[in-house]
Amino acid sequence: MLGALAVAQAIYGRRPARSPASTRAMLLAILATSTFEGTQARGARRGALPAAVAGGSGFVAELMGVRTGVPFGRYAYSGRLGPRIGGVPLLAAGAWAAMARPAWVTAGWVTEAPLPRVMTAAGALTAWDVFLDPRLAREGYWRWERPGRYEGIPASNFLGWWLTASAAFALVARLDPFESGTEDDAALALYVWTWVGETFANGVLWRQQRAAVAGGVAMGLFATPALARRRAGQRR
């Protein structure tokens, strides 16, 4: 499925105008690919666990966020992501879930120690949002009440992502603290592909060089050591 996703993303990235329907479809495609990979590698329950926990935790945090401004800052969604509950699109849960298992597996190659792995996985997931948030906010999927200095995104958003993801991965670690292994290679490949693809798309296709550099560095901080240790066959 990763090959099919790569082709779909290449087509999507080259379109001059990306419709809300195509953006929703792309998020669902990433989620489907990640979920399929997880169930193939670890079985249905274990493979889907990171996505389920992160999706649920993220959606609850978003519900709180649109009401109180905690933990992300004050913002509001438009209707472009589809049906909403409590002002939060259902697809927002998918955005949290889609990269959860790849982030968890990537972190598992960086470190095996439980607490550092949780914190690293939270950072790896948050790094994806360094790409995601500027583009979708720019295209009108949500609006920040007080825009920040980085592409209009406040720093509190990324802190909120890291805290929410940390809570989610702490639960994942408690329920199923598996070590990353060769059977999880497709999850690591999805994280690395997302890092490379988003960097290229932002820097070359969409002319968003600032996001390309920031996101490329952010995801690269996790992808690079994980990939190096996987290639070396190391666990620590």
Image (spheres, grey):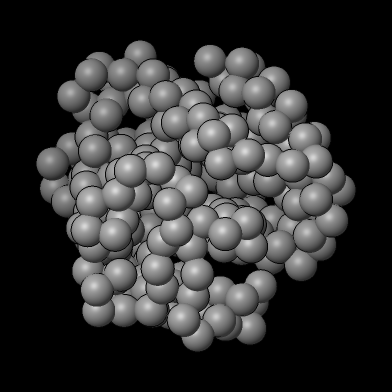
Q: Residue at x 22, y 58 (%)?
A: 86
Q: Residue furthest front?
A: 79
How many marks overall? 0
Relative to the observer, which residue lies in front, 56 or 142? 142
**Residue drawn at (45%, 58%) of the image:** 78
217 or 159: nearer the viewer: 159
Q: Position of residue 82 (x, y in %)?
A: 40, 42
Is 28 displayed left or right of 67 in the figure?
right
Asked if one can make out residue 24 in the rendered structure from this viewpoint, the answer is yes
| Residue 95 appears in the figure | no
The picture quadrant where one finds residue 118 is bottom left
Does 57 appear above or below 99? below
Residue 85 x, y percent position in the rendering? 23, 51
Quadrant of the rendered image containing residue 191:
top right
- Determine the residue positioned at 53% across, 15% down: 1
Point out residue 77 in the picture as x, y percentages from the top left corner.
Answer: 41, 61
Residue at image x 50%, y 37%? Answer: 24
**Is residue 104 rendered to the left or right of residue 4?**
left
- Seen in the picture, residue 196 relative to 156 is either above or below; the reply is above
- Foreground residue among 23 and 195: 23
Residue 74 drawn above or below residue 233? below
